[in-house]
Amino acid sequence: MFRSLRRALCAVATALLLPLGTVGLQSAHAAETAGAGYWHTSGRQILDESGQPVRIAGINWFGFETSNNVVHGLWSRDYKSMIDQMKSLGYNTLRIPYSDDIFKSGTVPNSIDFSSGKNADLQGLNSLGVLDRIVSYAGQDGLKVILDRHRPDSGGQSALWYTSAVPESTWIANLKALATRYQGQDTVVGIDLHNEPHDPACWGCGDTATDWRLAAQRAGNAVLGVNPDLLIFVEGVQTFNGVSGWWGGNLMGVAQYPVQLNVANRVVYSAHDYATSVAQQSWFSDPSFPANMPGIWDKYWGYIFKQNIAPVWVGEFGTTLQSTVDQKWLAALVSYLRPTSTYGADSFHWTFWSWNPNSGDTGGILKDDWQTVDTVKDGYLASVKAPGFPSSGDPGDPGDPGGGTAACTASYSVSSDWGSGFNAEVKVTNSGSTALSSWKVTWTWPGSQKVTSLWNASYTQTGSTVTATNASHNGAVAVGGSASFGFGGAPGGGGVPAVSCTAG
């Protein structure tokens, strides 16, 4: 809801709060090889080509829907290094918003830095050509991609799936063009048909001009007509039977009016949910908050999963984490989404908003330098991250030359120190000539400091010496790539000790 508020501005500083219950990712319930090929649905689960359940646990990387006509941040970094970093943090899926402007002849990406060899293979490409490279490299890294038709044009969000300038026929033609473009490339597992339909969009009213459910059926069938292997992701609306919620977040109408497509087992319903940094909602001021939130989510979209109707994907959720309300909201939502260690892939699917730091009312996983990870925010998500997927890249691609030397370096930084305690982050960088499969970091404090909470790694402490090893989701680090973990400790005043890194 209030999508116009989610403008691209410099992110504000996030509050430094230790995440709750995020000690690392376990994947005992998920097969290592799950996720191969194209996917389909079975009841509330998404299954891979061999019938193994998978969990989408991903991130939004926006920009193609803006006047830059390309994902943001390429003015700072190479696109491959960012995808490597996403993988190292344990995100397994990439949602990429776009506008129909990228299909116009003459549309070219801008604000890409080509200095010092960055983004070298993107030079001279149009927006669709850059998208091809991002999809290809994501697949090589074992990430899946969901393409999100975010806006009819880069000027702003639309309530309906069409405008006077971009009619329904153009919307469908471009959806079919994408489905055809990536036919046979199973990195792209599906398309989110339109982002955040809202009033006057309705669900089940029968008016072809405003009934989003009917439009989704028309578009979904058109996509499946050219690429029947894709999943069709269908968001909600704003209002159903007089009950309003977030834009795209109201799926109450599914119970009475499900989306019915010509190819079975292809529909995944998608909800969006946000905190007070985006907009105020009545449930945030309920005296029982946050205990009231599971009931709210059940009503709007959770029932679809709980009644085994179809899989549910929370395609966007995010917050600056500045307020206590927002911190409680995110902790409650992550719990509601079901921890992977307990439920495996029998869980809600999700892609966090956003990777980008320049989302004005949420900020991102990256900080304003487009390099440093907000380990507090990322830490909240640790329990619902899930294993990555098999690489679908070209075996002949020179991604790993092989036979090189494994090596790593580590840097230690204190993000806050209030005397009685502190927060810190350690960044591990692959400084060798071959990919890392694991890493171990060691340091010794000069005083009596103890780790009180640590996320995105496991650790042991003997006296003042701490040894941290990678979690299951971030041990693999590409050449030049990095992984990070964060922790809280006490007391403060320990300074920045020397850190050693051992590569595996």
Image (cartoon, rainbow, N blue to C red):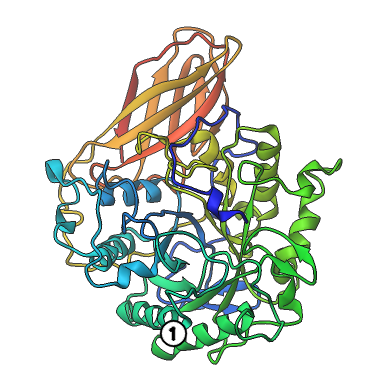
Q: Identify residue type, mark 1.
A: Ser
Camera-nearest residue between 199 and 419 = 199
Q: Is residue 168 above or below residue 10?
A: below
Question: Label 1 belongs to which residue?
Answer: 169
Question: On the rendered structure, is 71 left or right of 490?
Answer: left
Q: Position of residue 394 (x, y in %)?
A: 23, 68
User: Which quadrant does the C terminus fall into?
Assistant: top left
Q: Quadrant of residue 395?
A: bottom left
Q: Residue at x 78, y 65 (%)?
A: 243
Q: Is residue 475 above or below residue 491?
A: below
Q: Residue at x 51, y 70 (%)?
A: 194
User: Which quadrant does the N terminus fall into?
Assistant: bottom right
Q: Position of residue 459 (x, y in %)?
A: 50, 31
Question: On the rendered structure, is 83 left or right of 220?
Answer: left
Q: Is residue 167 above or below residue 288?
A: below
Q: Position of residue 257 (x, y in %)?
A: 71, 82
Q: Quadrant of residue 44?
A: bottom right
Q: Residue furthest front?
A: 164
Question: On the rendered structure, is 298 left or right of 366?
Answer: right
Q: Residue at x 64, y 80 (%)?
A: 211
